[in-house]
Amino acid sequence: MGKDNNKKRKGKRTGNKERKHPLNKTKENKKKNESKPKKSFIKITNSSVPAARFKNKVSKITSVLATGSRFNGKKVLSARQVQQGKETNQYKTSAKRIKQLRRDGVPKKVIEAMLQKEAKAKKHSQKKRNVRLGID
C-alpha cells in the first residue's frame, strides 16, 4: 500500500486570508534581494545533506565533495570556513581518494570503515603529540 493521503493535516488551513505583506512591500524586498550578490557557496549542515544524519557515515562535507565538490550547483564550505572566509582544501584530498577508490570498485562501506579507522589513528597520534608537547 502506498501513502495514505487522507491523513489529518497538522495545523489549521488558513484559506483565503489577506496577504501578510502588502504587494508593494514584497516588490521592495525583491528589489533589495536582486541588488545583493548571490552566494556562490553553500554552508554544509545536517539539514542541507540529509544522509549525514545517520550514524557511522563519512564526514558530510567529505561525502558531498566526493560528488564533485559542488552541492545544488554551489561550492561546499563548512560553517567554520564560512566564518573564516576560507575555501575547502583539507577535505579535497580525502574526497579525491574516495572517488578513486569508488572507480576501482571498492564498496562504499569498506571505504567508510577505512576512513573511520584512519581518523581514529590520527586522533590518537594527535593526543600522543599533545602529551609530548605538554598540551592538555
Image: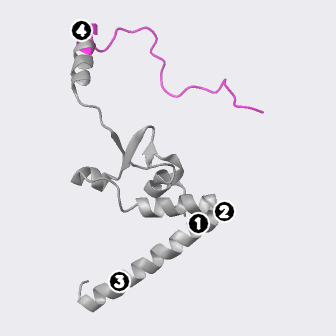
Binning the other alpha carbons within 10 Å of mark 3 as few (below 14), some (14 to 19) or many (20 upward) gives some
Q: Mark 2: which secondary structure? A: loop
Which residue type does callout 1 highlight? Ile
**What is the C-alpha distance between the residues marked 3 and 1?**
24 Å
Mark 3 residue type: Lys
The residue labelled by disc 3 is 127
Asked if the residues shown at circle 1 and circle 2 are in contact, with their CB atoms under 8 angstroms apart, the answer is: yes
Do labels 2 and 4 touch, CB within 8 Å? no
Q: Which residues are magenta?
A: 1-26
Residue 126 in percent (x, y) is at 35, 81
Which numbered disc flags the more N-terminal residue, 1 or 4? 4
Quarter of the image with the N terminus in it: top right
Q: Earlier in the sequence, mark 2 or mark 3?
A: 2
Name the image quarter holding the C terminus: bottom left
State if disc 3 and disc 2 touch (CB < 8 Å). no
Give the labeled residue for mark 2. Answer: 107
**First reached walking from the N terminus: tag 3 or tag 1:** 1
Query: What residue appears at the point 24 percent right and 88 percent down from the top-left corner?
Result: 133
